[in-house]
Image (cartoon, rainbow, N blue to C red):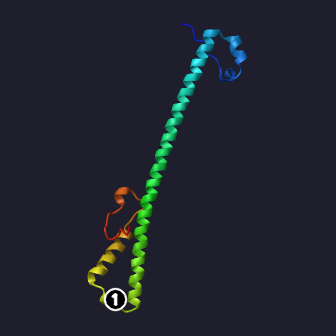
Amino acid sequence: MAEDPALSVRVSELRDPDVLFERLDTAGIRGVERRVRADIEHKKEELRQMVGERYRDLIDAADTIGEMRQCSGGVVAAVSDMQRYCRSLKQGSAARHEVTSRQQRSARVALLLSYRWPFTPDALPQDPLLSHS
């Protein structure tokens, strides 16, 4: 079985068509063309896969940013509640607050302090006390 002359062509020779036409016959040149076209298609497929992976990474990052936005909104709301509560304590009206109201605020603060980074969708609690949408 003789070796196909198109397979023995070096990459540097592909850049110079004159060398190809001097060394190969018509069938050999067609073999080089098939090999180059197959390489091109292979590289296109690799590029498609790479772009697809980067697109998925981008979508995951966007989802994470959305989750962080939601969580930070809950943190801001809890801090705002704490500021209001501190103001009410300063004004001496803390006695009017019910025990359950204080317990709810304490539970919110404890819940917020128990968060771990990075957030995952299943790590975000669905506490109706924290949603301020």
Is residue 133 shown above or below 20? below
Q: In this rendering, would 54 be left or right of 13? A: left
Q: Quadrant of residue 124?
A: bottom left
Q: Position of residue 49 (x, y in %)?
A: 49, 37
At mark 1, the secondary structure is: helix
Kindly identify the amino acid type of the residue bearing the numbered disc 1. Answer: Ala
Q: Nearer the viewer, residue 131 or 19?
A: 131
**Which residue ends up furthest to the front in the rendered image?**
133
Pinpoint residue 63: horizontal percent, then vertical percent. Answer: 43, 54
Residue that protrudes farthest toward the top in the picture = 1
Quick check: can you spot residue 26? yes
Q: How many marks?
A: 1
Q: Which residue is mark 1?
A: 94
Say which quadrant the C terminus sits in.
bottom left
Tell me the residue at 37%/56% (across/down): 121
**Quick check: 74 above or below 16?**
below
In-image side of 23 versus 7 (left or right):
right
Q: Residue at (33%, 77%) from the top-left corner?
A: 106
